[in-house]
Image: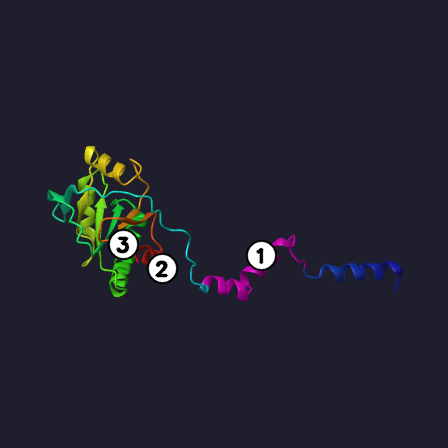
Amino acid sequence: MGRLSLVTLVMLASCNDPVKPDTGGRSEQVAASTSAAPSVTATASHAAVAAPRGPLCDTAPRTLPKNADFVDAAGEVSARAMPAWDGRRARWVSFFASWCGPCKEEMPRIRSFSSKLEQDGIPIDVTYVSIDDDLRQLKAFFDAQPAGGLKSSYWLKDGAVRTSWMASLKMKSDPPLPEHAIFDGKGKLRCFVAGAVEDADYGQIVAALR
């Protein structure tokens, strides 16, 4: 067989080899990383209980006003005074609005916290105060609540009463929500929380009320 024929056979054989697509390398690395099992460290970090954030409570003196409007699930509005301090029961005042997602998310947690506080020998009442501008929105929020959910609250409509409350509690005139003011049974502020409470915050709240 001549030299030219041998070269021709080699070329024909090479044409039958499958050609691999050019991946550029990166796509293979991505595929490997997405299909690989998670590391022990990553799994442990997801399973770990959230550590308490720290310091939760602002303890600067604040005064809780006595009077505000009260709204029930029927949308009825009436003037109502805050209950008098009895020297024994603490009071958790939670500021919310019907449009505030974190406010709604934390409500079951606050209910759970109040039950735990009772079990830990700290009797407490939870009072909700709405700063909704639109009473219809607040009523719609009450209507949408499940059985056992929030069906009434105090209401600070925009105006002089709201301004007085915000000043007494050293809150902004248009506060970021939610915010919480937690008092002992004598009306002394023990913990003011800016932002939503989290599961890991319970220990700091107990400590503030002891």
Quarter placement of the N terminus: bottom right
How far apart marks 1 and 2 lie (CA) works out to 43 Å
Amino acid, disc 3: Met
Up the image or down, 59 lies above or below 48; here it is: above
Amino acid, disc 2: Gly
Q: Position of residue 85 (x, y in %)?
A: 18, 50
Magenta part of the protein: which range? 19-46
Q: In this view, does 106 lie to the left or right of 36?
A: left
Badge nearest the viewer, 3 or 1:
3
Marks 3 and 1, the one that precedes in the sequence: 1
Up the image or down, 74 lies above or below 122; here it is: above
Residue at far top of view: 160
Assign a secondary structure to mark 2.
helix
Circle 1 is placed at which residue position?
Answer: 30
Please tell me whether the stretch drawn in magenta is mainly helix, strand or loop: helix
Magenta stretch encompasses residue 175:
no
Q: Are marks 3 and 1 in contact (CB under 8 Å)?
A: no
Marks 2 and 3, the one that precedes in the sequence: 3
Magenta stretch encompasses residue 45:
yes
Circle 3 is placed at which residue position?
Answer: 107
Badge nearest the viewer, 1 or 2:
2
Amino acid, disc 1: Val
Q: Is residue 57 left or right of residue 148?
A: right
